[in-house]
Image (cartoon, rainbow, N blue to C red):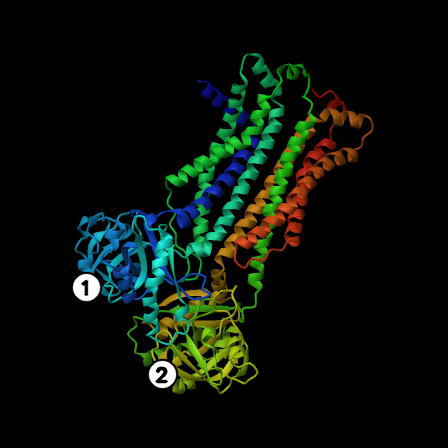
Amino acid sequence: MDLWQDTRYALRGMRRSPVFTAVAILSLALGIGANTAIFSLMETAMLRLLPVSHPEQLVELLQKYPGEPRGNGYWSPRSYEHIRDQNHIFSALIATSIDNRVRLISEGSEPEFVVGEYVTGNYFSDLGVTPVIGRTVGPQDSDASVAVISWSTWTGKFHQDPGVLGKRILVQDKPATVIGVAPRSFVGLRVEAKTSVWLPSESSKQGGTLLGRLKPGVTLQQARAEMAVLYQFAIEERASHGNDPQVRNLKVEVEPAGNGLSTVRDRYGRPISVLMTVVALLLLLACVNIASLLLARGAGREREMALRTSLGASRGRLVRLVLTESLILSAAGAVLGAFIAYFGTTMLLRIMASGRQHDSVHLTVQPDWQMLFFAVGIAILAGLLFGAAPAWNAFRTAPAFALRQTGAAPDTRLRRLFGKGLVATQVAISVLLLSCAAVFLTNLSNLNRADLGFRRDHVLLVSVDASRSGYSDQRLSQTFQALLDRLETLPGVRLASLSAPTPLQGAGASGFATVEGYQERTEDRRWISIGYVAPKYFETLGTPLLAGRGFAFADQANARVAIINQTLARYYFAGRDPIGRHVTLYNVTGVREPRMYQIVGIVGDANYFEIREPTRRTIYLPAFHDGRVGAETFVIRTDGNPESAAGAVREAVRTIAPAIPVSRVLTLTDQIDASIVPERMMATLSGFFGALGALLAGIGLYGLLAYTVARRTNEIGIRMALGATVRNVTGLILRDAFVTVIAGLIIGAPIAIWGQTLAATLVPDLTALAATPVALATTAILVTALLAAFIPARRAARVDPMEALRHD
């Protein structure tokens, strides 16, 4: 009964102060919503366990070259069988090969590219995944044309028809019979992509990623020790296949896999952790802000609290009354924060999905009990946190003293210092948030201004898919050449060429090289990146030709010519002229025999991998060679907005190559932005949260000063009656404000320098700039403080002395 009365009273009080209530609820909603959104992303991408039996026992086996940030998960069939049969640490060893572009056709539907997994017969049974209907792929299905479909595929394409069992689908244009439906909770092993179809894979025919289940009692250290011995078989197998000079430097890694297989943790783990810290600070700032506003309101309720105590209310009842109001505010903020979290999570997922095709992240965040407990827990914690100070203030109210006051109770020195301390704390936290945001924004600006070895403006990238065109190699080559000629005649198009890959997409292929006249030590050999480009490619991108010549269509008759980048020329030909010399490539992706090429040109360095890493040794080969074409992305330089030419380009493709669909169209600027998604996300969100923190600090300062002016109205009237001018009163209020702000800046500056240094260590290749971000944050806070102090100072200066002296 008492709780219901306290709730009704708190709601009436909130209704009587609509501005305060709105500010408090909105501040909490932003803090709780931001924390819930980032936590939901962290929980989905980094913390959530796979919905399988004993996920904590699962480990992933990786192979790592020297200098690689993360190991490669691909294993050969023979290595899989050797580890499966010879180990003493795994109760099961599963092989899976994941394909992000499996062409799926079901009866009565259009072709669709989905994620597919080719799995060994023990995949489902050893993971402990039971189908909703039918059965799963088993050992007996190694050569069978069968498939297990996901719940979403069953729902979307077959409308949960129980008769789906036995139906035929086409996967990669091959027929397969549906034998089962996976449970709704299981969408494969990859965190960032949902599997739609599982197909059997015979281990003797296809390798893949290896997942082991540790036997009970086996530790991770024991598994690593035994795998180091078993891995020698894989090294010898790879050494017997070619001339990989780094093969004996390969190391095996055994990593926990209970949270699924993912590259998202490597790419986004640290940024998400930093953002989680930032939003926690933002919520703390909101709590301090509301605590200071509640204290200001509470000072005016001292007579009420004293009267309640005199009438028999216990101090515990007063504390409960105040905390009830705080928890109601927090609950309202949590409800509104849930909507903010939903839209915030949607925005985050959209940003993460905007990455490059090979590393874009497609997560599905589904609410669960952990998220619910987090949201409820953080709401209760916030309510108790910002309600603690007002509750203590109510607890220590002296009834006799409060009831003897005929006017507003004078502020004690301790109370004034505590109120100013809360505002100074807000300023310090805001400086920390703003300075860290300035670091991330500066880093993003540096990346956007980085010299990548090409001009990023006015370039359109148009990718086509000729895999199912039915064209012969010669016809396809002739068609692409005709299309290049047509593209250059389009209005607004200056140059057109062809490439695989395009900038910041990786390498078209890779291999090792031996160079005429250079004896390289085995331990110094590294993979050479290989790109396939058509004539006019370097002119189209604006990459300078430093020596020799570019490619010409006449090179098709003699495809053994190459152009090298400056890094490769500097390494192999220091002080010598490379033009006319020969380089032999071997272990090239898709090519068995070594091939010798004559160097005909040198071009400037350009970045094809990551903006943050040094340029790799790169060799360019003709896209048109031996009557074939080795690239499917048209690179088009326009005079104006490249997107305006997209329609004409599509029409040209439809006219000249009707059997070849356009698969992707984007600008080079968009592709560069897609390569720095984590940095863009960090800069955007930290900048937003920093600005929000400054706004909350301004609101807190405004609330303190407004409360101060109201409490000192009588004093101000006396000062003005004794001759104080408007300027004197304004200066008095502004001086109090700036003393508080300067105190916060003094506290916040060293914390900000430490915080941005810590942020720089958490995010790869982030440079901490100690002075500039702190200076920018300090300036922003001072401007905010000036704006927040202006209205209370102006109000104080307009006080009528006679009215003020009669102020009760």
- The one nearer the camera, 282 or 70, is 70
Q: Residue sitting at 49 percent across and 87 percent down?
A: 580
Distance Cα–Cα, label 1 vs label 2 = 37 Å
Q: Quadrant of the N terminus?
A: top left
Which tag is nearer the camera, tag 1 or tag 2? 1
- The one nearer the camera, 719 or 312, is 312
| Residue 424 showing in the rendered view | yes
Q: Residue sitting at 51 percent across and 24 percent down?
A: 10
Percent position of residue 434, x then y: 60, 48
Percent position of residue 136, x then y: 21, 53
Q: Is residue 670 left or right of residue 147?
A: right
Percent position of residue 32, x then y: 49, 39
- Report which quarter residue 225 is drawn in: bottom left
Residue 256 higher or lower than 511, as above or below: above
In the rendered structure, which amino acid carries the disc numbered 1? Asp
| Residue 50 showing in the rendered view | no
Identify the residue under disc 1: 143
- Report which quarter residue 761 is drawn in: bottom right
Q: Residue sitting at 55 percent across and 49 percent down?
A: 686
At label 2, counting other C-alpha atoms closer than 10 Å, the crowd grade (few under 14, some 14-19, many 20 or more) is: some
Identify the residue under disc 2: 626
Q: Is residue 252 left or right of residue 391?
A: left
Q: How many marks?
A: 2
Q: Earlier in the sequence, mark 1 or mark 2?
A: 1
Percent position of residue 665, x then y: 42, 65
Tag 2 secondary structure: loop
Tag 1 secondary structure: loop
Q: Quadrant of the C terminus?
A: top right
Residue 634 higher or lower than 706, as above or below: below
- The one nearer the camera, 561 or 498, is 561
In the rendered structure, which amino acid carries the disc numbered 2? Asp
